[in-house]
Image (tube, rainbow, N blue to C red):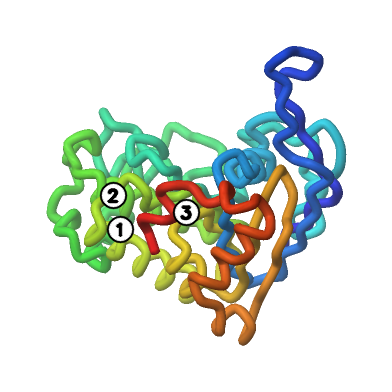
Amino acid sequence: MLEIRHISKTFNPGTVNEKRALNDLSLTLEDGDFVTVIGGNGAGKSTMLNAIAGVWPVDEGQILIEGKDVTRLPEYKRAAFLGRVFQDPMNGTAATMGIEENLALALRRGKMRSLKPGISQSERKLYRDLLLRLGLGLEERLTSKVGLLSGGQRQALTLLMATLKRPKLLLLDEHTAALDPKTARKVLDLTEEMVAEQHLTALMVTHNMKDAISIGNRLIMMDDGRIIYDVRGDEKKKLTVEDLLHKFGEAGGGAFVNDRMMLSK
């Protein structure tokens, strides 16, 4: 479903602020893979997701989604087959628009716009049924402005919007990091449920080592813009937080693990 071939990205080349963010990175995801991504600050996790999404061009290498070379495609064209949930609950939705209007935009992603009436009754029923499953009471607030929602409600809505059209690839960039533990657990449970039901292929960046181990069928660890550890299946299930800490220590001499990772043990 996803093939990354030897991509590299350097920011501010030739200046004192030069930063090699991705370093000859290669990765292949099969259809239905749910991969958690972990690594220290500046390891290249979010940069990799931004490269896949087309936020900016890579310097070298290729990116293929379901066999299609998207390396030179702009971000808005990739949006037709990508779903994305960001760390900040304020991203991914239009705050001044209603819940049903945001869902309507997500449903029409990648389609030509027309002058037909906005939201039909059958479409509104679809939204109400989908929101009902979230268990957050949003099905009775279809016209409420999204900016009035809590962070957890907004993130759950963003997740629903990102999966509404069954994307080829779902990108989750620390999408529970800004939430309190109880709300984060709710959003993670919803994530696992939606990925499993729709048989989605997903990449989830996280700083929480327990979540990285327990969620998905595969785990990769990044450092210095490259993948240094890749584990899946039964081997992944047997991992412990101590195992990951040991791997972090090997990669960065102990300084690789940041405070947020230690607090999430």
The local secondary structure at tag 1 comes to: helix
Q: Is residue 98 left or right of residue 68?
A: left
Which residue type does callout 1 highlight? Ala
Placement of 84 over or under 190, stated as above or below: above
Residue 230 spot, x, y in % from top left: 70, 67
In front of the other: 141 or 49: 49
The local secondary structure at tag 3 comes to: loop
Marks 2 and 3, Cα distance to the nearest angstrom?
Answer: 13 Å
Residue lying farthest top? 15
Which residue type does callout 3 highlight? His
In front of the other: 112 or 137: 137
Is there a contact, CB below 8 Å, between mark 1 and mark 2? yes
The residue under the point 74% across, 40% down is: 22
Marks 3 and 1, Cα distance to the nearest angstrom?
Answer: 13 Å
The residue under the point 28% across, 64% down is: 186
Residue 154 spot, x, y in % from top left: 28, 46
Lower position in the chain sequence, tag 2 or tag 3: 2
Q: Nearer the viewer, mark 2 or mark 3?
A: 3
* Residue occupied by mark 1: 184
Q: Residues within 10 Å of mark 1 (few under 14, many from 20)?
A: some
The local secondary structure at tag 2 comes to: loop
* Residue occupied by mark 2: 179
* Residue occupied by mark 3: 207
The residue under the point 33% across, 60% down is: 187
**Quadrant that contains the C terminus:** bottom left
Q: Residues within 10 Å of mark 3 (few under 14, many from 20)?
A: many
Which residue type does callout 2 highlight? Leu
